[in-house]
Amino acid sequence: MSEGKSKFLSKVLVVSAGLGLLYIISRNRRKIFSIFNKHGHPLYGQRIELVDSVEKCDAVVADLKKQCIKNPVLGFDCEWITVNGKRRPVALLQLATDNGLCALFRLCHLRPIPVCLRELLLNDRILKVGVDSHEDAKKLAFDYSLCVSGTYDLRFLAKENGYKAEGLAKLAKSHLNVVLDKNWRLSCSNWEAVELTSAQLNYAANDALVAVKIFNKLFSQLKKTWYERTDYMAIHQLLEYQIDTRFNAKLENRQKCSPITDTAEKGNQIKRKTYTGIRASNLYDNTQLQAPDGELLGVIDYKKAKWYIDNGLATEIATNPYIARLNFEPAARPVGSVGQYYKISKDNQCVVCGKTDTFVRKNVVPREYRKHFPDVMKSHSSHDVLLLCPQCHEKSNISDLAIRTYLANLCNAPISHNNTAIKSFEIPKLKSVKSAGRAILNHSEKLPEARKNELLEVLKNYFSCDNIDEDQLLIASELNTNLDNPDYCQHGEKVVEKYCNELGGLVTLEKLWREHFLKTMEPRYLPELWDVNHNANRLEIRAQEGRLNEIDMLKAGIKNSSSNEKNH
């Protein structure tokens, strides 16, 4: 075969192959394009791990932690069902990493909750991002005593970049061009079913995965605007004021400057940022109060010292520091380390992390319990009022749900989410009778004839008569429409009663709350001499001095050492 003919045949073969390839591509272009699109899709590479056993949980949590080393962010969401209008405990917890691992924890089948999962959720260095993630964390704390730290609402980040604070589906469409399936049949499906369908698994996994994808995209935009560093160690520095904080749409719309910065520049002035409901001024001014002989009794609030002076009960001794000296002998003087605690100057800083800009007062023993204490245990309660920054305060409140649930079960004292917390029920039938009586009695002339006849029929049926007189109208208008709930109990009151009578006294309850605070918050800046047994020691001193009656001693759980000595 000649050389020219060979070259010609080669060209024909190449052209034929090219045409064949073009034909194949054109014939299968939709499949080919879908493959390319799939690889470029934000949710491509999704790997779903369904966790319904302790063994599987250990392995999956280890994988999640490993993948969070470089990017400490997890998509976070929860699913539950509602029966007869009441929410059931969270059935499914979803956590997803940026590279596509979607762990679905079937909490309704994981009993007890594995320690490894508890530790992961408690780790505040790993962000748990989503929409309304703070509220999901509260549900987990309430349902399973799971403390979730490091929650972050994506709407904060959207607002910081100048976008609308939208729901997850709209954020996914706006920033990832991903359409999430939000069909109510899926969202309201049975998440407690023996086996979840593939549609349910994909729905749950997508919600968590799309959350972390949205975060990464919006955070990368934020870094270009606010920060030079490109690694994820900058996350907490940038977002610290929004971590573990509930997103309040109304409040956010009113704010004119970003909470990412401590200050907002306006013209040539620097204005410190303030937050609604958060204390920006100092709580402790450490004013000294002295006995008539000059002995320091304690450090108090300046306003209290000024009240003593204005009422002629004390004399101003110095102004820097401010010192007020009493003109009368106090009922008692500080004794031992208990008394010494009240003499120590307190720092205006978060006792957990040490921040000094904004504070929230934390009642270590919540008021819902202390308000039922005897008066002697309500006074001198400043020991249990500590300063926390907003983020630590939110974290502490979430962890408190676990101990409240424990106390509810221990003392048979249901928390206020069910009917046992309702003191009385309003009876609709009696309410309609009362309304009818008042309407006719007070507005008879203004009522249309047809409406007046309807109201009279209601009254006739109630009184079982054909005519209604003025006395009956008065009786109807003053009806008590409420029925006392025989199952009513106030959670805090019942817990206090249980500890007073059966569980070692109220100092035991106080100690429980203080130890819980130390364990969950690990405070590094507590005031010197702060002690879990503070009130017990104080009351024992009062008992020894004869300033504590027998009833209060029994309620507190303090033994009368003086009477014991007499018996011996």
Image (cartoon, rainbow, N blue to C red):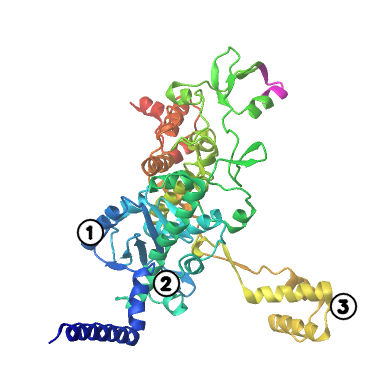
Q: Is residue 270 left or right of residue 556?
A: right
- Separation of marks 1 and 2 at Cα, in angstroms: 27 Å
Q: Is residue 318 left or right of residue 40?
A: right
The residue shown at (39%, 48%) is 232
Q: Which mark is residue 445?
A: 3
SS class, disc 3: helix
Q: As rendered, which of 212 and 136 lies closer to the eye?
A: 212
SS class, disc 2: loop
The amino acid type of the residue labelled 1 equals Ala
Can residue 547 be seen by looking at this rendering?
yes
The residue shown at (24%, 64%) is 53
Residue 310 within the segment the image draws in magenta: yes
- Separation of marks 1 and 3 at Cα, in angstroms: 77 Å
Q: Is residue 466 left or right of residue 491?
A: right
Residue 121 within the segment the image draws in magenta: no
Pointer 1 with pointer 3, Cβ within 8 A = no
Name the residue carrying label 1: 59
Q: As rendered, which of 198 and 11 lies closer to the eye?
A: 11
Name the residue carrying label 2: 81
Q: Which residues are magenta?
A: 308-316
